[in-house]
Image (cartoon, rainbow, N blue to C red):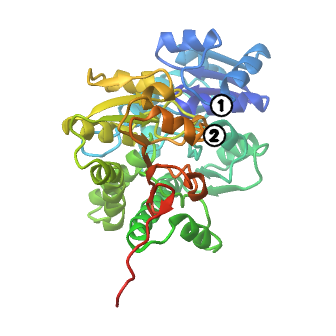
């Protein structure tokens, strides 16, 4: 099939590249000439494992190309996929300006039958609004559909090529058949539904996963107080098929481009319908507070961080990506600076992206994990990069001024810390000091 993908962010670029890998002819469109030039030169604007290699092979095969000429791309396509950004506005609503602009340009370019697909995450009813914008200016027939994406940054290529399910929301049998044919090489688990339900499935899915994360973090906080191990608790919970083991990893909360944006948007959607989504509001509140546990643990260890040097490992919101959007590191480092600490920070991939947003002279951006840890009064691990997991604790001990370690992602096991001098605080597990696990007082009822 011939596809035009509008937008070369995470969703658009990964989707377009993967569709070309399936043998389709794909043109990816973006307004930014510099980005298109980069892609045409074989460079990739985002860090995503496996993506660069797929771009190279499919470009060489003639199945994949990049352009700023939206009209030509749409005219050549059978299916037009809209994958532009829908960032949050200050009030939490989704900003639909980019998608509305894309819809008008697509409408002006439609000269024969097309299926227009919205893959961007949008509030319920947006597909119909997009269709109306196109209908006002299009000179030919078209159908529209909602096909939400469920990929995860860091595993986006794998998720796209091996999806759990494909959701197609459309009232058109012709569009449903074309889109089913497009996706059938990926999975037989294809569900056809109405457009509004499809739009809601995306928000509901992300909201539920965010809820699981906040829930296990609340359980972790209780585990610390009663002396239980949240990892054992999560393991036991996950064995229940009704619950499942995914997204039960305790830590310092979620970040990135999806969960924060989509939870806020769903709260706003509910509010516009005069419904108070109390549960999801609590999920958001819990998530924001969870990242400050790092500060509370530093206070407990050091008494006062003023004048102290704090090493930070990890600035991306998760490993295997250079995305720092809504990363917990922002608020953690900001709080440390407000309290008078000196900060030395390192990330294997995301340092430059983080520094572009958080360009503060008080932060020393380091070129290695060792440099960030050397001479520090405490080290905080905020992203679970494999590079950090592979560093021997004996090396970390030799680098630090004082062996204080805050493990915000639980990358170490209790047995790793035995016979070490570390004061070690993790999430949802008993503290350790000099290799000895702290015992909790006996509970009285």
Residue 360 position, x and y percent, is 27, 23
What numbered label is drawn on residue 155? Answer: 2
For label 1, the residue is 49
What numbered label is drawn on residue 61? Answer: none
Which of 365/55 is in front?
365
Residue 54 position, x and y percent, is 72, 25
Say whether marks 2 and 1 touch (CB < 8 Å): yes
**Could you tell which of marks 2 and 1 lies nearer the N-terminus?**
1
The image quadrant that residue 245 belongs to is bottom right
Q: Secondary structure at mark 2?
A: loop
Which of 275/125 is in front?
275
Q: Secondary structure at mark 1?
A: loop
Q: Residues within 10 Å of mark 1 (few under 14, many from 20)?
A: some
The image quadrant that residue 46 belongs to is top right
Residue 404 position, x and y percent, is 40, 45
Which of 382/178 is in front?
382
């Amino acid at each position: 099939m011939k596809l035009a993908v509008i937008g070369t962010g995470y969703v658009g670029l990964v989707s377009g590249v993967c569709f070309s890998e399936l043998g389709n002819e794909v043109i990816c469109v973006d307004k930014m000439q510099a980005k298109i030039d980069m892609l045409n030169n074989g460079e990739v604007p985002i860090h995503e494992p496996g993506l660069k290699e797929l771009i190279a092979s499919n470009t060489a095969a003639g199945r994949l190309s990049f352009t700023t000429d939206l009209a030509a791309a749409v005219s050549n396509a059978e299916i037009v996929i809209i994958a532009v950004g829908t960032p949050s506005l200050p009030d939490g609503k989704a900003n639909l300006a980019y998608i509305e602009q894309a819809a008008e340009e697509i409408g002006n370019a439609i000269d024969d039958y097309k299926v227009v697909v919205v893959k961007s995450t949008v509030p319920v009813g947006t597909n119909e609004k997009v269709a109306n914008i196109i209908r006002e200016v299009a000179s030919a027939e078209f159908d529209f559909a909602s096909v939400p994406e469920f990929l995860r940054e860091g595993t986006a290529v794998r998720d796209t090529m091996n999806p759990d399910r494909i959701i197609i929301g459309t009232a058109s049998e012709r569009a449903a058949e074309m889109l089913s044919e497009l996706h059938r090489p990926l999975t037989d688990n294809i569900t056809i539904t109405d457009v509004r339900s499809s739009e809601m499935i995306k928000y509901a899915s992300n909201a539920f996963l965010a809820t699981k994360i906040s829930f296990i973090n609340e359980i972790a906080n209780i585990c610390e107080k009663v002396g239980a191990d949240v990892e054992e608790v999560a393991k036991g919970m996950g064995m229940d098929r009704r619950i499942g083991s995914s997204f039960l990893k305790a830590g310092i909360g979620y970040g990135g481009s999806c969960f924060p944006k989509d939870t806020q948007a769903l709260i706003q959607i509910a509010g516009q319908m005069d419904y108070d989504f109390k549960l999801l509001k609590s999920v958001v509140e819990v998530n924001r507070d969870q990242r400050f546990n790092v500060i509370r643990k530093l206070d407990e260890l050091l008494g006062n961080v003023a004048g102290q040097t704090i090493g930070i490992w990890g600035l991306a919101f998760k490993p295997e990506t250079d995305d720092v959007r809504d990363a917990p590191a922002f608020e953690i480092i900001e709080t440390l600076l407000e309290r008078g600490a000196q900060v030395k920070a390192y990330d294997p991939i995301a340092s430059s992206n983080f520094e572009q947003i958080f360009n503060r002279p008080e932060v020393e951006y380091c070129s290695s994990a060792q440099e960030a840890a050397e001479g520090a009064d405490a080290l905080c691990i905020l992203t679970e990069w494999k590079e950090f997991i592979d560093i021997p604790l004996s090396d970390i001990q030799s680098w630090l001024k004082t062996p204080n370690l805050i493990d915000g992602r639980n990358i170490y096991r209790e047995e790793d810390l035995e016979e070490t001098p570390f004061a070690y605080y993790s999430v949802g597990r008993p503290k350790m000091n000099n290799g000895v696990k702290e015992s909790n007082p006996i509970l009285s009822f």
